Image: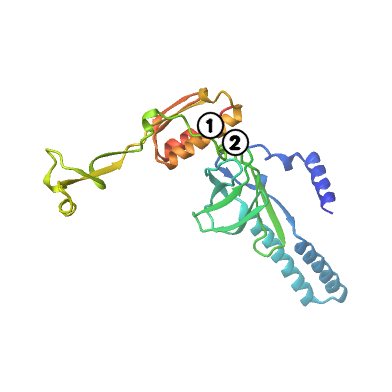
Amino acid sequence: MRAALARLQQWAERRLPALTRYRRAEPLPIELHRRRIYIVPTGFGLGFGVLLLVMLVGALNYTNNAALLLTCLLGAASMTSMLLTFRALDGLTLASVRAGEALAGQPLELHLSFTAERARESIRVDVTGQSEAFHLDAGGEADLAFRLATARRGWLALPRMRVWSTWPLGLFRAWSWIYPEQSALVWPQPEAEGPPPQRPDSEAAERQLHRGEDLAALRDYRAGDPPRHVAWKASARHEGLLVKDFEQPRAHEEWRLDWRELGALDHEARIARLARWIGEAHAQRRRYGLWLPSQEIAVDSGSDHYARCMSALAVLP
């Protein structure tokens, strides 16, 4: 049955160009209007139409005015519901599309923002097998969230989206296609494990002793040590005076991540290793810079710097 419906749809799209008019990507905002909204009876609507036809034949056959009046009233209500179903989509606007951040292989968060001047009820949006329903107050805004599967780094084109409704009675189904002219950037997947980046030899010792806040050890008194650093209780058990010495973590050295130092790896392996180093540096709150064939990113730190470096790796050819 599904195969037959698919063949019927393909035939219709070849014969009726209007059905494929909006298969091309278009810029935001995207407003739905009468030339791009399609409407057909639902299965329930077809059954209801058959029932009205039987009622009409029976009323005419038996000259029953009450039955004829009821049939006409139900028919008028069904035609009114068709107009309301169409108006549920007419004028609806996709105002903005926001994509989150994701590594290749992880789901990407996609947020769609819809607006409308009139109030709307029971609108649904289908995106890659996911369906979300929403309603809008007059002049309001609705934000919908979807999760897109990712497989590889780089720009990911947004899929076509179907907006539809069967409100208010479910007799008719109105729908329209939306294809935003936007893409989301997927960051490269870091390698699972590997060697750390080359560091300066002076970074072997991670801590140094100095006058700070954290107690490190006790040492013999030297001329010039302040009296407040003398450990009086400990000195009472020894022949000489003992002085408190303190330590604090030494500042991390800057990491210089260089594409040219990974010549033994292939193209994608270089990207995966640099992505892992960037993630480790960001997690350790280090300052780091990145050299790539296409650009050089100065030493910095923070979330914005991390996003800039990962995005630079993602767009490498």
> Of 186 and 144, which appears nearest the observer?
186
Q: Is residue 240 above or below residue 306?
A: below
Asked if labels 1 and 2 touch by Cβ distance under 8 angstroms, the answer is yes
Q: List the residue tagged with mark 1.
A: 313
N-term mark: 2 or 1: 2
User: In screen coordinates, is 164 left or right of 311?
Assistant: right
What crowding class fits label 2: few (fewer than 14 Cα within 10 Å), some (14-19), or many (20 or more)?
many
Residue 289, numbered label: none
* Three-letter residue code for mark 2: Arg
Q: Is residue 75 above or below residue 298?
A: below
Kind of element beneath mark 1: helix
Give the image location of residue 240, x and y in percent: 15, 46
Distance, label 2 to label 1, CA atoms, is 9 Å
Quarter of the picture holding the N terminus:
bottom right
Give the image location of residue 158, x and y in percent: 61, 41
Q: Is residue 49 above or below residue 223?
A: below
How many tags in the picture? 2
State the residue at coordinates (47%, 31%).
197
* Three-letter residue code for mark 1: Leu
Q: List the residue tagged with mark 2.
A: 153
- Asked which quadrant contains residue 87, the reply is bottom right
User: In screen coordinates, is 162 left or right of 305?
Assistant: right
Quarter of the picture holding the C terminus:
top right
